[in-house]
Image (cartoon, rainbow, N blue to C red):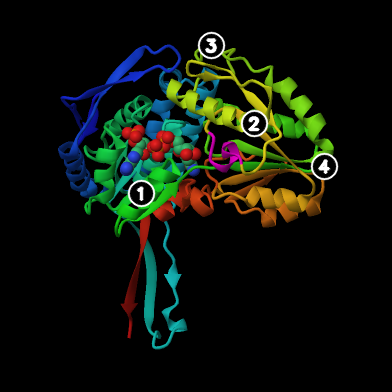
Amino acid sequence: MDMLIGGKHVSSDDLEEVKNPYNGEVIDTIPIAHLQTAELAIAEANKAKDSLCEMSAFKVSNKLFDVVEKLKDNREDFARLLTLEVGKPINESLVELDRSIETLKLAAEEAKRIYGESVPLDAGLNGKGFFAFTQRVPLGVVAAITPFNYPLNLTIHKIAPAIACKNTVIVKPPTEAPLTVMKFCELLNDEFPDGVVNTVTGYGSEVGDYLVTSPDVNKISFTGSITTGLMISQKAGMKKVTLELGGNDPMVVLKDANIDKAVKGVINGAFLNAGQVCMGVKRIIIEDEIADEFAEKLVMETEKLVMGNPLSSDTTLGTLISEKAARHVEETVNNAVKEGAKILTGGVRDGAFYEATVIDNVTQDMDLVVRETFGPVAPIIRVGSIEEAISVANDTEYGLQAGVFTESYSSAMKCAQEIEAGTVFINKQSTFRTDNMPFGGFKSSGVGKEGIKYAVEEMTKTKLIGLNLR
Ligand code: NAP
């Protein structure tokens, strides 16, 4: 599939194969662009700014709604392609499509709500006699750099609000799973003037880095790992940056919790998308009194998951993004076992598959839970009190989301107030998001928020206009 720059299809002498992680078959090839192509995309995106700004909010909104309809019409085709390139079960891909449609719809609505406010300058010294108001104006060119795990919805979380508030966009999709994003940008391009949306494929370290450092890009909206995010924040210079980074989300299960509900939370939270979810349940922190019963029930439910061809609607556990990624998970789990952890179920790799794994007797210093393990693993850390649970939950550089299971209001509120995370859910696992909510982590998990209204705030700047009426 070609790139799309200034409304034209663009290729490169260098091509890379996009492979299905399930069977290794080549799905398509993509161009590996170099600096000149990134430069061309930046020029085209800058050129298109006026044509987008001249469109009324009414028209931008309607055009986005037209894309919603097109995406709905192509829902099954997109979901199939997503499953082929990521290896996630088809039912999960269909959910990603539904969320993508919803995200786009929210942006189409938000395009009509870009408000300013009147500002009483007469409340300040010498301000009498002014009429002043603010406007939210676009930043200019937004570069959207996105990861492989939810490529379509996470990219729409950037492109759609950017266009809703009249920024042009350059998308750098993940090299391992670029195709659904590129296909989606074709739909958008059919509705908007040439150059409003551009795609540049190639390596993050080359074209991604070029976008980050270019003075002609006004904002970087990045979702990916902490390592890359940190590099971006150091190189971006004066441009605005939003960073949605990794998570190591705790699920705190207190002794008065509804155990069945918590077990269901782990199944939906630790194994979704083969555990490759930023807000996945990555550490189960549970009070001793109920840990044995919880572990037994969790093993029973985990063993019901069906690993198989991701295109089959019976499959509930697909592959990881690559065999390399699965090997890394295998090695991390094996190291934890060497240090004293105990596998209760799972622990076996087959190509890019890794079995859903429950692992007990984990301690907070094991690499398995110190760093983000991006695979279908549910590590159990046993604790003696709510205070210890909160302390373990906070003993990490991450702070994306958290889930707490308890039937007590006071325990729920204590955890909600003391756990350092962008979101704390009570009686729900961290692996939950609606596309309108403010989403973004504390600590090293990120800078800034997404969720359409919040993304629009981060993709506009405030201008004050003051009329001296005296
Ligand atoms: P990644 O390796 O950081 O890659 C993300 C994107 O950055 C890719 O498009 C990559 O391009 C590009 N990139 C790589 N190096 C770059 C550089 N030097 N400059 C600019 N761009 C560069 O992350 P990943 O492995 O794809 O994704 C997994 C991570 O994302 C996990 O840590 C996960 O928790 C996090 N994540 C966070 C959220 C959130 O909302 N907080 C959501 C989903 C995932 P290439 O593909 O060409 O390398």
Dots 2, 4 in contact, CB < 8 A: no
* Residue on which the image places disc 2: 378
On the image, the x and y values in percent for residue 389 come to 72, 48
Which residue is identified by label 4?
Answer: 255
Which quarter of the figure is the C terminus placed in? bottom left
What is the spatial separation of the Cα atoms under label 3 and label 2, in whole angstroms? Answer: 25 Å
Q: Is mark 1 within 8 Å of ligand 1?
A: yes
Q: What is the secondary structure assignment of the residue under circle 2?
A: strand
Mark number displayed over residue 231? 1
- Mark 3 residue crowding within 10 angstroms, few (<14) / some (14–19) / many (20+): few
Disc 2 marks a residue whose amino acid type is Ala
State the residue lying farthest toward the bottom. Answer: 126
Alpha carbon separation for disc pair 2 and 1 = 30 Å
The residue at 20%/48% (across/down) is: 46
| Labels 3 and 2 touching (C-beta < 8 A) | no
Decide if residue 201 is on the left or right side of residue 83: left
Vertical placement of 307 versus 466: above or below? above
Which quadrant does ligand 1 occupy? top left
The residue wearing badge 3 is: 312
- The magenta span reads 366-373
